[in-house]
Amino acid sequence: MTEMKKRKKNPYLTANIIIVILLGLLAVLVVLPFVWMVLSSFRTNKDIRLNISSMWPDPWTLTGYAAALTKAPFVRWFINSVFVSTTVTLIVLFTSSITGFVFAKYKFPFKNLIFGVILATMMVPSQVLMIPNFLIVKGLGLYNRLGALIVPMMVSMFGIFLCKQFIEDIPDSLCEAARIDGAGDFFIYARIILPNIKPCIGSLTIFTFLERWNDYLNPLIMLNDTEKMTLPLALNFFSSQHLADLSATMAVASLVMVPVLIVFIMFQKQFIKGLALSGMK
Amino acid sequence: MKNNKFVCIVLIPIFCLIVVFLIAPLFYGLGISMFDYNPLRADNPFIGAANYVRLFHDTLFYRALAHTLVFVGVTVTLNIIVTLILAQLISSLPWNFARGLFRTVLFLPCVAPMVGTSLVWRNGMFATKNGLVNHLLGYLGIPAINWLGDASVVMVAMIIFTIWADIGYNTVLFCAGLDGIPKDFSEAAQIDGAGPVRRFIYITLPLLGRTFIFVLMMTLISHFQMFVQFMVLAQRGAPNNAATVLTLLIYKEGFSNQNMGYASAIAVILFLVIMVVTVIQRRVNRVDWGY
């Protein structure tokens, strides 16, 4: 079959090349804003304002980055973001997988009713919960603490749903055999279920982490202190504080975005596979 | 398996969290919408349906509702059309490397935080004087447009930005859907003399049914909830609230004006709008697509 394909000339070669050129042009347009951002972060403000026709820095400068790192607690913001995103991701992975396990493999009363409630709450848009959640977080004494970004996010309906779908594909006999050998429930979860749903865990990690890392609305509502901010909120704050200093704003924007883009490009295969996987299920 | 003790140990804490942060807020929000609620005040009187009555006389609410519906309608339609075409083009390429490269590039805006991309577009792309969009339009002889300052075009700017920021997801999902369709059908149709466009409409599209429904559903729901670009790129829905959508109005009323009762009433309406769209969409989809 493959040999036949090799021998046969591709009848669509011209069409394919035209498509590649068109998509290539589109790809350039899509990355253009990122290129502009990174180049602008190395330009002086005067250069950005006066040399309209060129995107290229003349001269190259690091004053934007110097301003970004000295005029604002950037490192603090970065640590906040890492802390919140990592904590939430680890907790969500645990709660989703163990709850998915229970729903996939156990029989208990009101199971369908409870799962129905979980599915229904998945449809509730977060903006609708914005005000009551703010008041609840305030009532719990979490307002203006990083906990406000962690505690309400510890359970993910999507995560539970995804894990349940994957765990259902693991044969029951595997769990029962372990049961007969005397394995406890938690042992079965940790040693049999978890290793068998690695792709699911992988994509859930990526999506939860990214969602938390990029979240703007919750920090906007729940936080007040500059010191407590996570990166997206801090970025907008910084830009409104330094309106005239576009070079520094783009330096902060680059510091926030470029690591995300690099991590994505490094893991893009797993990433895109994971997305397709969660979409198919 | 059966072990009620283990099930309880797992589910009780999980369910407490769900109740406190998902179910209770829903009813709490409904409750607050019937109060004149200001969190900075000690006395918040019950006013029944007064917030809802006020909504029906509030032109800004009507405008925000209209902006939301127009934004979602136009953006989702364009998004689906564009991503279907892109996915079809990308999947038609015989080179793995090119397919992967284009998918990755189109996906880049989806992984970047939208606050950042909004700032870049505000300062770099949509700026009137040295913005790249006007620069490119200048080559075509089109005079500079004040994208974010002119009330009549700011929504167009929002739509352009959102398409740029969001096509990656659906392109990847449609690509996966297309790769899942066996080539035989298309090849058979080709032998019967169907051109690429007809093959796409009569073979590919119906076979894409399940993916299509899923993508449409997710895109609709996510676009109703869009917030960042209206807050950051259009700077709080400016000018003259021409880019104020329901989510932004909820935020502004609730957190800038501290009118949480009124804001909750708007949130309830947004919830109903999303519910209605979801139900209609499900009805429509139940009829056909059964391949």
Image: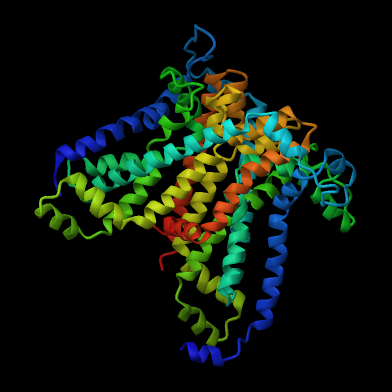
In the depicted view, which residue is nearer to us: B241 or A233? A233
Q: Please determine whether, in this image, residue A6 is positioned above or below residue A124.
A: below
Please provide percent x and percent y for residue B64. Answer: 64, 33
Residue B75 screen position, x and y as percent: 63, 50
Q: Quadrant of residue A72?
A: top right
Q: Is residue B264 left or right of residue B197?
A: left
Whether residue A68 is visible here, answered yes or no, is: yes
Residue B83, image x, y percentages: 60, 60
Taking the spot 39% from the left edge, 41% from the top edge, the residue there is: A90
Above or below, A8 against B240 in this view is below
Instruction: Name the residue at 85% across, 47% down.
Output: A59
Instruction: Locate the C terminus of chain A and report the quarter of the image it occupies.
Output: bottom left
Q: What residue is rendered at 55% in x and 84% in y?
A: B190
Is residue B244 visible to the viewer in this orientation of the structure? no
Which residue is at the front of the view, A218 or B270?
A218
Residue at 28% in and 59% down: A169
- Residue A23, relative to residue A191: is it above or below? below
Tell how many labels: 0
Q: Give the colour scheme of this rendering.
A: rainbow
Residue B26 located left or right of residue A194: right
Left or right placement of residue A273 versus residue A238 in this view: left
Residue A168: percent from the left, percent from the top? Answer: 27, 56
A236 sits to left or right of A185 = right
